[in-house]
Amino acid sequence: MEARSSRRTTTRSSGQSGNGAAPKSSKGSKASKKRSASKKVLESFNPTTGELLGTVETLTPPKVQAVVDDVAEVQPFWAQLSLEDRARYMRRAADVLLAESDELAELLTREQGKPRVESYSMELLPTVDALKWIADAGPEILADEKIPFPQAFLKTKRAKFAYEPIGVVGVIAPWNYPWSIPFGEVAIALMAGNGVVLKPASLTPLIGERIRMIFEKAGFPEGLVRTIHGGGRVGDALVKSSAGKLFFTGSVEVGYKVGVECAKRMKGSVLELGGKDPQIVCADADLANAVSGAVWGGFANAGQTCSGIERVYVVPEVADRFIEGIVEEASALTVGDPSRWDTEIGPMVSEEQFDLVNELVEDAIAHGSQRLCGGPVEVPGFS
């Protein structure tokens, strides 16, 4: 069930493609293209209305290393702080985030398209909890560990296991959870004494900029967290830069490439890639909970979740009742304007994403599946 209520276009003067892809058209997109033709900017559009929300400056791939170098100059000063001092900065960031939560929730809903309730419950509040956990647990986790010597002839020796910052960490963020996923990765890297270069998804650049601003407003050293914008080549340049470790969230195809390039350079990478996550329903399952879990796991964020329920295996004894429950709950979901508190499903993030999902559904039907409810929805006032 998708709300095809808007279109989004991203314009890049460099001609590079971004994470995700631009749909066919958007309200006012031709004029926007003309205005930005001479500027190196990335435009962000509201997927509900097609409204131009703002622009960010893009970077050419050869300039990415210079940004990494700039962060590397600031990072040693940050690394000299004690773990307790870094924890205090984390708590400040949590305070700033809470103070700006309403404004940030509105931006998340306008730029990514997820319902307002989800902007709070699945993006902002989890990062507040994460910051407080990092502040509370970080000093203990990262503290020096004494190494015991049980051998008698080594009793006079002392040794410890000490954690040292990597230096600069790169984070390449996704568009489906553009706040909570990269924010947590940036915060953890900072707690460990590193600087960070963040590349937000090209569909959600304004959210990426606000992540940087939260840390700056919390008093973190200026330039310790930097954002870079552009297409896939900019992300590739970050992977191939001197950044000591990479966090990447995205497709399996691109993840393979990131892992290979990091391995070539003998540096670590954390890859969170797409999945085909199953739910298994046994005969003794609590069907009410199983149905609710399937509907929430399948339709949260309009189904645009890398760990969402994508397929369900149900034993024959309860299959009919389970399917009836799914149809009933799915049919009752409210599709509409994501800024409304009662909306449960907003628009897909882009027209291409809508086309991709619709193609998968139509292909399944063509191969024998049945559509028992739902389908593309034209939302009044946004068609």
Image (cartoon, grey):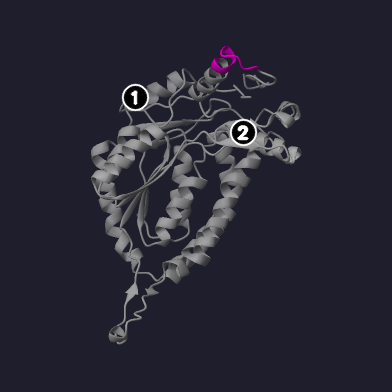
How far from the left and from the top, in percent, is residue 103? 58, 45
Give the quadrant of residue 46: top right
> Left or right: where does residue 148 sit relative to residue 130?
left
The quadrant of the rendering that contains the C terminus is: top right
Secondary structure of the residue carrying tag 1 is loop
Residue 368 in magenta? Answer: yes
Give the Cα separation between the discs numbered 2 and 1. Answer: 40 Å
Which SS class for mark 2? helix
Q: Which residue is mark 1?
A: 37
Q: Looking at the image, is 173 positioned above or below residue 375?
A: below
What's the magenta region? 363-370
Residue under the point 62% across and 17% down: 369
Residue 70 magenta-drawn?
Answer: no
Given residues 83 and 225, the one toward you in this image is: 83
Can residue 39 be seen by looking at this rendering? Answer: yes
Q: Nearer the viewer, residue 59 or 36?
A: 59
Disc 2 marks which residue? 298
Identify the residue shown where x is 33% and y is 42%. 259
Between 240 and 39, the one nearer to me in the picture: 240
Amino acid on which the number 1 mark rests in the picture = Ala
Residue 124 location in percent, x, y?
Answer: 57, 48
Q: Position of residue 270 (x, y in %)?
A: 39, 47
Q: Position of residue 163 (x, y in %)?
A: 35, 66
| Pointer 2 local density, CA inside 10 Å: few below 14, some 14–19, many at least 20 | many
